[in-house]
Image (cartoon, rainbow, N blue to C red):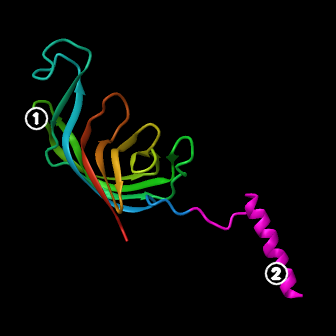
Amino acid sequence: MKRRHLSRTTHALAVLASAGVVSCATEPADPRVGTYGLTTTLETFTFETSAPSPPDCPNPITYCTHSRPANGATLSGTLTIHSVTPASSPSGQSSDIHGEFSGRFCDTIDYPTGCSSLAAVALSYTSGLLVGTGGDVEVYLVGGTQLDSHHLNLTKATFDGDKIAGSVYWSLHTGRSPPAYWGTFIARRRR
């Protein structure tokens, strides 16, 4: 009697599975999900002034963007990708991403040379967005308050096994062309 009941149950599940009502398989975890130790090589510091502002903008224009060497700025920490929306989704986006970072950011701008003084910062990025599918994606992280938020953008990022590498943009403020650092990053999966 037990065998006949098991047979009917198995048959019913097989019928439902073939109709797509029940699935015995689970979606595999996205290989990008995990916790990564992230380090950067910050190469350029940019800031904006009104013009004229020699030597970069000798003529009168509305804004002048200055680009200088990064001069010792640092940024490193932990990037956590908790989940990724399936690649079949129309947007290819995931918003379950967080980050905890520390570094040294410019606290005094010297117009001729760029940054003349660095200050230690600790940053929590409480929301993030992963855009793209497959190996080439962009990660946008935002932290702070609505009035004073900080941004960390990981662009042209390529996932390669347990490593993510690409370009980084880091700013402590919102608004038009805030002081920012540009460079490259590498993130390695933590075990």
Residue that mark 1 sits on: 113
Element type at marker 1? Answer: loop
Label 2 amino acid?
Leu
Closer to the camera, 5 or 165? 5
Q: Position of residue 171 (x, y in %)?
A: 31, 40
- Frontmost of labels 2 and 1 is 2
Label 1 amino acid?
Thr
Left or right of 98, for residue 90? right
Q: Is residue 25 magenta?
A: yes
What range is drawn magenta here?
1-27
Residue that mark 2 sits on: 6
Q: Position of residue 127 (x, y in %)?
A: 47, 49
Left or right of 78, for residue 86? right
Figure disc tally: 2
Q: Quadrant of residue 116?
A: top left
Q: Residue at x 13, y 45 (%)?
A: 71
Q: Main secondary structure of the magenta part?
A: helix
Q: Residue at x 76, y 68 (%)?
A: 14
Closer to the camera, 11 or 139? 11
Q: Residues within 10 Å of mark 1 (few under 14, many from 20)?
A: few
Element type at marker 2? Answer: helix
Q: Position of residue 68 (x, y in %)?
A: 15, 35
Q: Earlier in the sequence, mark 2 or mark 1?
A: 2
Q: Residue furthest right?
A: 1
As drawn, the label of residue 65 is none
Q: Quadrant of residue 187?
A: bottom left
